[in-house]
Image: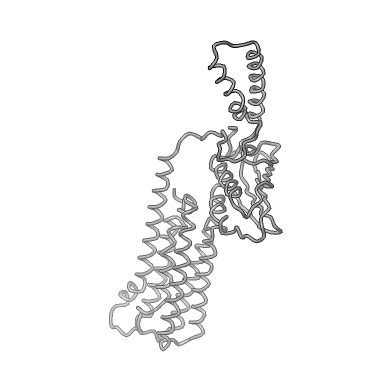
Amino acid sequence: MRNDTPQRLDPLGGMTARLFVIGSAVVALVVAVTLSLSTFDQLSAPVLEVAALLAITAAAGYYVRAASPFRAPFPRRAYVVVNLLGLAAIVLNSAAQWGTNEIVRDDWPPIAFAVLALTFGSWRPGWEIATGTVVATLTVGTIAFVQADTFAADVPGLVFAILAATPILATGAAASAFSRSLVGSLLDWRSAGAGPATSETPSEGDGVAARASHLVHLEDHVYPFLERVAETAEVSADDGDRARVLARELRTLLVLDGERSWLSRIVRTTDDPRRIADRMSEAQRGLVRSLVTHVRNNAAFDHDRMRLTLRGDEWEATCTIEVPCDAAHNPRVQLAPYVAVARSVFGTVSWQIARGAMAITVTFDPSTTGSTTR
């Protein structure tokens, strides 16, 4: 649980969280520009103030980019970069007002940084957020304490330090608590919902029921024959011959169906000579099924020409889904949920839409994630 994050446990929830990131980035920039202009008379080095504004802009822009579902999961590196850029804005703004800053409450960097920090809880573990919050709080508090002599109010420097650091401390603590609470709830939900593996028997919704299937044979031939026999009082010699033929055909189809992988039951064209798909985990199979269903039901794709190729060895394997798509459509936004979930259940995910075709490639370790269930 220590390194679990809400996004890893609930990738689709991360898509909603990104909307809040965009909103917080906009609010942070509005606060920065507005308060910077209103305190222009307190600046002693305007160039440094411009640099501070550029730093908070870079922090907000990088944050929004890193929170994209196509770049999931949100990495520790991105969290560190956003924090460093936010702290750079704080230091540069303080340097721009050094010796001329009169009121600590109207300094915009702590407020803008706090607005961004409020949404950290969706992306990183609680302990990481708490660590970043402590560093930022000490930085802001120390700077305010050192500047205390220039402020108009005649109060102890510690008061200015607490006043300046409170926004970051409050939002950071809230984000850390949110992350810990949500991770705990998601893990509890997973534990409560854990159950036996689902059957790989194809359903009507799979959309690719081959006519050679034993289920189709039963429905079209065996059941009608049995119903007719049940309605008659006698069984003729012809009925006996017919029963033997149906039984022989059914045994043959059962063998053929048993040799087909679950993947070949949902996609007509598969290339998996080593049966690597059978070693995918349940979560990975579920993602592939969902993506195939999405492609089949989306007018942007020519699903009849969809192809799945699996290659690899005992330790590393790749699965590539290729399907032609209509250049007049842009399926990128609709694919975002599937890419986000794929990044949480596969090792790596790469995708591209070019030259009238979409290709998504995922990697996984068959030795640890798989099952030989067919």
Viewer can see residue 302: yes
Question: Residue shown at 44%/48% (left/top)?
Answer: 1
> Looking at the rendering, which quadrant does residue 33 occupy?
bottom left
Q: Residue at x 42, y 50 (%)?
A: 183
Name the quadrant of the C terminus.
top right
Horizontal and vertical percent position of residue 81: 52, 66
Q: Is residue 159 above or below residue 310?
A: below
Relative placement, left or right, of 61 versus 246 is: left
- Residue at the farthest bottom position: 41
Q: Nearer the viewer, residue 83 or 178?
A: 178
Instruction: Give the total of numbered labels.
Output: 0
Task: Indicate the position of residue 62 as horizontal and vertical percent values.
Answer: 53, 67
Residue at 45% over, 87% down: 44
Q: Residue furthest front?
A: 232
Residue 373: image quadrant is top right
Q: Residue at x 45, y 55 (%)?
A: 125
Q: How is the image coloured?
A: one colour
**In the image, residue 88 lies at what x, y percent?**
49, 73
Residue placed most toward the observer, 29 or 197: 197
Image height check: is 370 above or below 150? Answer: above
Whether residue 278 can be seen here: no
**Image coordinates for residue 226, horizontal then vertical, percent:** 57, 19
Considering every residue shown, the one lying at the far left of the view is: 155
